[in-house]
Image: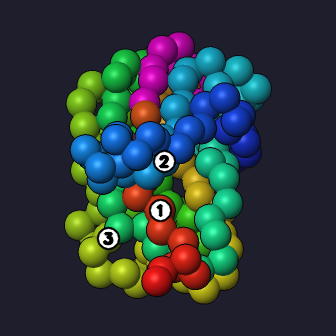
Amino acid sequence: MADNAVTLTSSNKSILSEQEQASFGFTNKFRINFADFSTVTTTGATDTVTFTLGALPAKWLVDKALINVTTAFTGITGATTLAVGTTTTVAAFVTAVTCTATGAIQMASTLPVLTNATATATKSMVATFTTAGTGGPAGITAGQCDIYLSIADQSKLP
């Protein structure tokens, strides 16, 4: 199993407006498009692509997560799954679930139990795609998803 590390560009990251935050409860949005796989070279059936989304603050808390697959990830003859978390616990926020169909993917059921979703040291957030089929990650020809997280900097609490 090989892993390709990709850093998500700043144009694919955004902080939601105050109105969006109030309406939906998320603070940050990260977009991953199949074109972001352009530098991926691995073709093995169990290979992965790890997108670094960015760094969390030193005293952080993530209490809500959601993936919205707007275009199904296709192009390989097998399943493609996506997990969202940190470099320490890659599925801390969203467990590895299929992203080959459109729709919302809910956060990990253990997220409200803050064992993996809070810390007092900065970590990087990651989204990890795993393929199970011929072509591997380099074979992905379509797909797009938006990852929504509610990230709080606990050092700013009143």
Identity, as a three-letter code, of the amino acid under mark 2: Asn
Q: Earlier in the sequence, mark 2 or mark 1?
A: 2
Q: As displayed, is residue 84 above or below residue 113?
A: above
Residue contact between numbered discs 1 and 3, judged by CB atoms under 8 Å: no
Residue at image coords 58%, 81%:
155
Residue that badge 1 annotates? 151
Identity, as a three-letter code, of the amino acid under mark 3: Leu
Q: How many angstroms separate mark 2 from mark 3 (CA)?
A: 17 Å
The answer to whether 39 appears left or right of 112 in the picture is right
Magenta stretch, residue numbers: 136-145
Residue at image coords 70%, 21%:
38
Residue that badge 2 annotates? 28
Residue at image coords 67%, 60%:
55
Q: Earlier in the sequence, mark 2 or mark 3?
A: 2
Residue that badge 3 annotates? 111
Residue contact between numbered discs 2 and 1, judged by CB atoms under 8 Å: yes
